[in-house]
Image (cartoon, grey):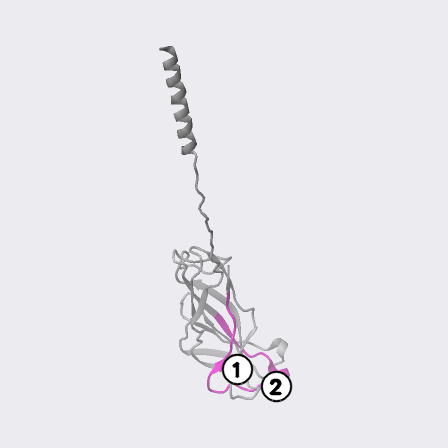
Amino acid sequence: MTNVKTLSKVIAIALLAAGSTQATAEETAPSTATVKVQNAFDLAQVTGIDFGTIRVTSDIGTATATAEVATVTIYANGDSPSADSKVKASAQVIVDGAAATYTIAKVAPFSKLELTLPADDAVTLKAASAPSETSNFLLSGFEAYITSGANKGKAYAAKNLAADSEGNVTFSVGATLKTDKRGTEGAITAYVDGDYTGTFDVVVSY
């Protein structure tokens, strides 16, 4: 009887061992990993800075170093434009202008973007058909205001242009228009009626 029990145990152990061997069988599945890089995004100007319609004179009779400058300021936050006149240079707004507007799309959600605007006096507005000595304008004091996204309603500062959950954000840009101060050294002449235009770059980066 003892031999029978012993034989039964041996058989049971053998069966368990066989089962364990079957349980450790394995298969291999070839696998892949992918990633798509999208560093590029969409940036577009919707409208340019419009300084409206103005009456203006420049200080054409004074040396450059002391020539007076009149200004018209378009505010990025949508406040009404302002004009500042001097004794020998003047500017008055006839029809209000408006800030430039921009859209950004396809950035990573909630990204904080850096905005670079032109330096003071780096942008010149000229009348296309006027002689070179005709008075022109310079732009300075560029500023931006965030109109959508995580920081909507704030002035741009220190990389706070933050996208929303869908990777979109909009902003506006204003600046100050300054009359010509080349004066007698530039032998400038008075402004002529018509459109004065200039171009500049607005740069947005991660």
Which of 199/93 is in front? 199
Residue at (50, 71) in percent of width and height? 176
Q: Residue 190 appears at what percent x and percent y?
A: 53, 86
Residue drawn at (55%, 86%), measured in percent from left and top? Answer: 134
Q: For this rendering, which residue is in front, 182 or 84? A: 182
Locate residue 154: give its quadrant.
Answer: bottom left
Q: Answer with left or right where residue 184 lies relative to residue 93.
A: right
Q: Label 1: state its secondary structure.
A: strand
* Three-letter amino acid code at the position of disc 1: Lys
Query: Residue 167, how many percent across, how many down?
Result: 41, 59
Which residue is nearer to you in this view: 93 or 33? 33
Closest to the camera, between mark 2 and mark 1, is 1
Residue 200 part of the magenta segment: yes
Please state which of residues 6 and 27 is positioned toward the viewer in this rendering: 6
The answer to whether residue 1 is visible is yes
**Image quarter hosting the N terminus:** top left
Label 2 environment density (alpha carbons within 10 Å; few <14, some 14–19, many ≥20): some
Q: CA distance from mark 2 to mark 1?
A: 16 Å
Residue 45, position in %: x, y? Answer: 44, 71
In primary-sequence order, the first of circles 2 and 1 is 1
Q: Is residue 205 above or below residue 69?
A: above
Question: Mark 2–mark 1 contact, CB under 8 Å?
Answer: no
Q: Image quadrant of residue 88? A: bottom right
Which residue is labeled 1 in the image? 126
What residue does disc 2 label?
187
Question: At 45% across and 44% down in the image, what residue appears?
Answer: 28
> In the rendering, at what x and y percent does residue 62 appear?
60, 81
**Label 1 crowding class (10 Å Cα cut-off): few <14, some 14-19, many 20+?**
many
What range of the chain is rendered magenta? 175-203
- Quadrant of the rendered structure where residue 152 is? bottom left
